[in-house]
Amino acid sequence: MCGLVGIISNNYDCDKDILGKMVECLSHRGPDDSGSQIINFKKVRVGLGHTRLSILDLSQNGHQPKESLNKRFTIVYNGEIYNFKEIQKELIHKGYKFESETDTEVILNAYAEWGTNCVQKFIGMFVFAIVDKETEKLTIFRDRAGIKPLYYYQTNELFCFSSELKALMKHPHFKKNLSMNGLSLFLKYGYIPSTHSIFEETYKLEPGYYLTVDLNDLTFTKTNYWDVLDYYNKPKIEISDQEALEDIETLMQSACNYRMVSDVPVGVFLSGGYDSTAVTALLQKQSLNKIKTFTIGFEDQDYDEAPYAREIANILGTDHTEYYCSDKDALDIIPQLPRIYDEPFADHSAIPTTLVSKVAREHVTVSLSADGGDEIFGGYTKYTRNINNLLKIYKWRHLLKLPIKVVSPFLKDTHYHNKSELISDSVLAKDISEIARKRIESNYINLELQRKLLNQNISSQIKTAFDDVSLIDQKHNSVLDMMMSTDYKTYMVDDILHKVDRATMSVSLEGREPLLDHRLIEYLAKLPSSQKIQHGSKKYLLKSIVHKYVPEKIMDRPKKGFGIPFDKWFRDQKNDLFDYFLSEEIIKKQSIFDYKVIAKMKQDFHQKSNSLTRQRLWNIFIINQWIDEWI
C-alpha cells in the first residue's frame, strides 16, 4: 500500500519543496521508498509524489512516480490490481514490453492500450493518477467499492489531490475554512459522506468514478464508470439456494486467493464472526501452511469475542495470535485519533481496529479483513427489525388514510430514539425508498439540535449518496435491497472502509478486502433479497457456506460488535481528556458550539447514560479534539 499526492498549478505553487513536504507526511502509508516529479506543460506545472509500502517486486523497479517506457505516461498509484498477471500476459501478446513485475507497470500499459476503459479489466482496490503528456490530461481513478481514499482541493488557481487530508494541509495555499455542510453531516452521522469533507473547496472522489483534468484550460470532467445500483436494477435471477451457494463460494474462493498474492507475509483479522470466519476458512482450505490470524480481546466480557475467535482458529488450524488490550492500551489511542483520522471521525470501533492493526503489523505486512459482509449478504439487525410490520402499516396507512393515533400503538422499534420520529420518518414516507433511507440513516444530532448547538441555520438539503436511494428501481427491488445498496454506497465507504484504511495505514499495514471483490456484489445484487434473509435468519447464504467448515453450534451466538466500554471509561471512571474537550473553557475558546447545550447533554449523561446522549457527546468530543489538533 502507498500514499500519493499531486499538484496542478499555473504558478509556482508547485515546486520540489512543497511536494516534498506533502509526500513526507504520508510516510506512514509507505515507509519503504518515496519519490516526486514535476512535469512542465505550456500553461501549468504538474507535481506528482509517492510513498511506497513494498508488496510486489520489492526492487527499485517499483519506485514511483513511474514513467512508461515511451515516456508518454507517468503514474502514481495506491492499491493492488490482483489480476495483473493475466492482464500482463494479454498486453505482452499485443507487443508491450515490461521491465518489472509490478502491477504499476501493468496499469500504465493497460491505459496506453485501452485508455480509461482499462479500469473495467481491473480486479482490485486502487487510486491512481496518470498524466498523458501527449493529450495533456491528468486522470484520477478510484476503485469501485471505495476501498482506497482520494481527497482533492480545487480553486481557480490550484488543484491538489492526496490519499489523506493531512497532505493537502501541507500546501501553503490550502485554506483551512471549515465547511458548515461537512460539519453538519459529521454531527448527524459521525462521519462525513462523499463528496463532502470538513473543509470548504475540498472533496472526496466518489467510488467508481474517474476525474479528468484538461491541463490546457483546467476544466474538470467526472465520469461514473461503475455503480452498484446498475446491478441491483437488473432483473433478479431465479436459481435455487444450492446453485447460488455454489456460485458464491466459487467467487469468494477466487477473491480470497487473489488477495494472497504478495511478496511479503500475509495474515487475516479473525473476529470470530461469520464474515471473518468465512474468509479464514476459504484461505486455510487452499493453503498448505497455517494462515496467520489475529484478534483483539478485551478485559470487559461484554465486548470480548477473543475466546470465540480462538476456538474457530483451532478448528480451522490457523497460526493464531491474540492480544488482550487493557483499558490503558485503548485509552492511549484516543489522543492519537485526530492525527490518524485527519478528518473528524466518531466511530469508536476505530480504537480496537487500530490496536489489532498494531498487533498484526508485528508479524505481517498485509492483512485481510472481512468488511462488507453485512452490506452484501444482509447482516445488520436494522434489515429485519419490524420491517414487515412497518411496511404493512405504511401500506394500510396510505390506503385507508388512517390517523396517526390509530397507527402509533403498533410502532415499537428501538432503532429509533423515539416513537414520533419513527412515525414522521417512516410511516408518513411518500414511498418505500424513503422508508429504506430513514431506516439506515443515523441521526445522532438532528438539524433542530444542530441549529441550537451552532447558533445558526443549517441547510436541510445537503446532497449525499443517500439521495441515490430514489434511483433504485422499485420494480426489481425490495425495501431490503434499497437498504443494502444504499449502505454499500454510504456507511460502508465513508465509515467502515475509511476506518480500516486509516487504522491499518497508520502502522504501515496493507489491508485487503476479499468480500468487496466487485464480481461478488455484482452477482449478489441480482439475487432476490428473500434468498439473503430467510425465515428471519440474516446472512443465510454466507452462514450456509461457513457451516461447511465450522459447526453451526459454535457460530450461533449473539454478535457483540467491535466496540468499547464507553460508560466505564467516560462516566464511571474520571477521564481528564474527555472532560477537557467538553469543558466550558475549550468550547468557548473554539467559538463553534453553544456550551449551554453541551452542558445539558453532560448533565443527562452523568445522571443516566443512554446510547443517543453518549454518541452525541462522543461526536462533539471528537470534533473538538480534531479542531485542537488541526485548526
Image (cartoon, rainbow, N blue to C red):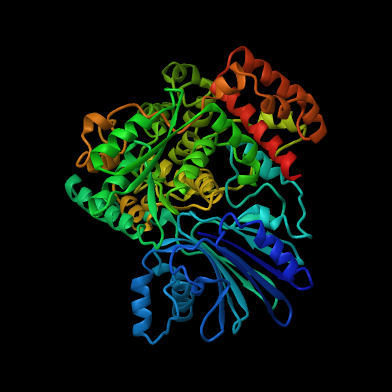
Q: On the rendered structure, is 261 left or right of 494?
A: left
What residue appears at the point 75 percent right and 67 percent down from the top-left corner?
A: 17
Q: Quadrant of the C terminus?
A: top right
Is 467 on the left or on the right of 394, as rendered? right
Q: Position of residue 163 (x, y in %)?
A: 59, 57
* Res 379 quadrant in image: top left
Between residue 331 and residue 533, name the one nearer to us. Answer: 331
Residue positioned 64% across, 27% down in the render: 617
Q: Where residue 550 sits in the image (x, y, percent)?
A: 23, 38
Q: Is residue 345 above or below residue 29?
A: above
**To which quarter of the image does residue 622 belong?**
top right
Q: Is residue 303 above or below residue 518?
A: above
- Residue visible at 65% across and 42% down? 338
| Residue nearest the observer in this picture, 192 or 67 | 67
Q: Is residue 576 left or right of residue 108?
A: right
Q: Where's residue 625, x and y in %?
A: 69, 36
Q: Nearer the viewer, residue 433 or 613?
A: 613
Q: Is residue 185 visible?
A: no
Residue 510, visible in the rendered structure = yes
Q: Is residue 281 above or below residue 117?
A: above
In the rendered picture of this protein, how many numbered marks are placed on residues? 0
Residue placed furthest toward the front? 362
Q: Residue 74's x, y, as percent?
A: 57, 76
